[in-house]
Image (cartoon, rainbow, N blue to C red):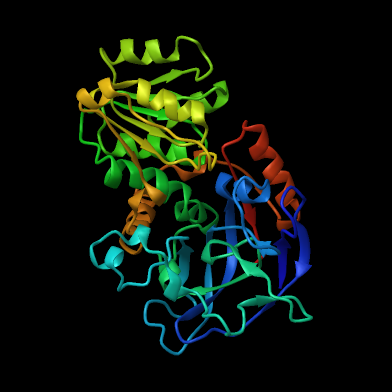
Amino acid sequence: MKAAVLFEAKTELRIEDVVVAKPGPHEVLIRTAACGVCRSDLHFVDGAYPHAMPCIPGHEAAGIVEQVGSEVTTVKPGDAVVTCLSAFCGHCEFCVTGRMSLCLGGDTRRKPGEPPRLTFSDGTPVNQMLNLSAYAEQMLIHEHACVRIDPEMPLDRACVIGCAVTTGAGAVFNAADVTPGETVAVVGCGGVGLAVVNAAKIAGAGRIIAVDPVPEKREIAKKLGATHAVDATSETAVAEIVELTKGGVDHAIEAVGRPQSGELAVKVLRRGGTATILGMMPLNHQTGLSALDLLSGKKLQGALMGANRFPVEIPRLVDFYMRGLLDLDTIIAERVPLTQSNHAFDQLRKGDTTRSVIVFDA
């Protein structure tokens, strides 16, 4: 198959031929239909987060099941599926207590000594990123890294549910548990942030304030349900939000991974408010609450992949789209072939676009 391979951080991906192994007992071979280009991948491509090389990035995908292993029970050939990096084992402490997104997923990977899932033609292993490696014509993954969806769902939209929407909507429905009438500030209006805005509207939030430096993104956020928009680079941004909400927001959800964004999220909280950090911050960065914040009952939390339980939640999100509640069409800025994956990363670096989607020929 053809795949976009990263050989070294801070270099361009190269389209290479990669050999895919046959599915093991609990593995699923999927023909990739579409894959969103996520900022999380960019962190690895640009070297902000480490990863073994060479590797194939990509983790926000949808496709059609081609083959299944002997023990697979959740999907069958011909099924339309969405993949998710939150591969879960199903029996660890995190899984059995309902915190599947925190599972380390060790049992969902091939064990040391077993043949790798991906290799070059000479047998050199190709590392699988985030259990998926979706910038490729096929994915070989554990069955607990994908879920069957409605076959009527367009796959070029479905793919963004696998990360951006699962993370953003999960932050609203699970981690923050937004209730009708509460105020929400969304800091960063890329793919994840726009999904937060849309989900906050579905949840019945009162005022939804989109905070982003790009005017076009703020306008898109309004289309998706934001009631107000604030320029993140304005010196009065915090004051504007506090004034709009008469004291601060109930929930501030950070969705870009910049230190300034995390600090802003904390500053706009009302007494008893909660800041939820979704973005991948620099590894040496710390975000915190002051003593006065703590005395005011404010809370700060992370939410890995929106604290999702994706086998249940992704089909529900697909249903939201099919019923017109979830607007995925507006989130997607462009569709490009695999050969333009480096262009898609360049667009992410500029910060002006929402979501690029790599589409594969049928």
The location of residue 80, given as percent across then percent down, is 47, 68
153 or 254: which is nearer to us? 254
Quadrant of image for the N terminus: bottom right
The location of residue 71, given as percent across then percent down, is 41, 87
Res. 77 in view: no
On screen, residue 22 above or below 15: below
On screen, residue 140 above or below 297: below
Residue visible at 37% across and 72% down in the picture: 89
On screen, residue 141 above or below 262: below
Quadrant of image for the C terminus: bottom right
229 displayed left or right of 123: left
The location of residue 335, given as percent across then percent down, is 64, 48
Q: Residue at the front extreme?
A: 291
Res. 14 in view: yes
349 displayed left or right of 113: right
17 or 316: which is nearer to us? 17
Residue visible at 73% across and 45% down in the picture: 343
The location of residue 36, given as percent across then percent down, is 57, 51
Q: Residue at the bottom extreme?
A: 70
**Number of labelled discs?**
0
Looking at the rendering, which quadrant does residue 293 occupy? top left
